[in-house]
Image: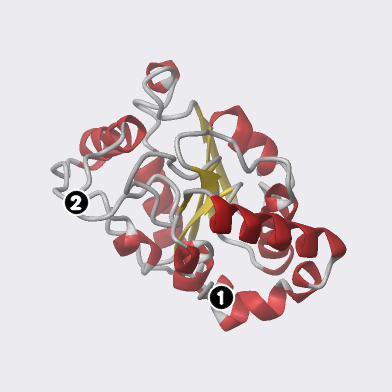
Amino acid sequence: MNVRIHPEWRELLQEEFDAPYFSSLVEFVRGEYATTKVYPTGANIFRALDLCPPSEVKVVIIGQDPYHGEGQANGLCFSVDEGIQFPPSLRNIFKEIASDLGKPIPTSGDLVRWAEQGVLLLNSTLTVRAHQAASHAGHGWEQFTDAVVRNLTQRREGIVYMLWGNYAQRKGAIVDSERNLVLRCAHPSPLSAHNGFFGSRHFSQANTYLAAHGLSPIEW
């Protein structure tokens, strides 16, 4: 399995890679890829960490599970490859950006363009069995991605954390809100977007904060 991860993250997370739980996780994930259909492709498991090294993170968006439909998951939370129909949550994210910043809905749902600007698009669980939501939950991924957030918040400040929904808010609870901008609202899912995601203006708030800290805003 050709796994790619940025050297900065590899060094920062070496203690996790060496931990017994991670060995068990690797064994489980390899077995799943060998015997059933799993998303994303093996090369994209750590794509969020490969495209956005810790020294360049400006914004963190936390998702829960990769998309489990055919051709959807590409290693970045909420993102799909060019040409793939927008899942409902992603469509609602683009609607909020349009309302907040006056930007047109894009033609592509590929959020690589965000990752390359310093947006860490981190799912809590980095793999999933096809058509079985949360099928890889509870095997160690959550402990690993907790370590990603913990390492960031210990070593960096001035980062915008967008915590959408209760799950992301629990995962981001360790973030120091005095040293970072922590934005919380409902999840962009159609089930909850009208309960506070729409109208949250997280994207303009993020850019205002970044500019105030001498950083270039994100081209959402």
Which residue lies at the image location 32% right of the left edge and 56% below the top edge?
Answer: 111
**Front in this rendered view, residue 74 or 12:** 74
| Residue 179 visible | no
Q: Residues within 10 Å of mark 1 (few under 14, many from 20)?
A: few
Instruction: Pick out the residue farthest to the right.
Output: 20
- Examine the image and state in which quarter residue 55 appears: bottom right
Q: In the image, residue 82 lies at what x, y percent?
A: 21, 55
Q: How is the image coloured?
A: secondary structure
**Mark 1 = which residue?**
55
> Which image quarter holds the N terminus?
bottom right
Q: Residue at x 44, y 71 (%)?
A: 51
Q: Nearer the viewer, residue 67 or 6?
A: 67
Three-letter code for the amino acid on which mark 2 is drawn:
Ser
The quarter holding residue 34 reads: bottom right
Above or below — where is 142 with respect to 55?
A: above
Q: Is residue 32 visible?
A: yes
Residue 207 lies left or right of residue 151; in this view the side is left
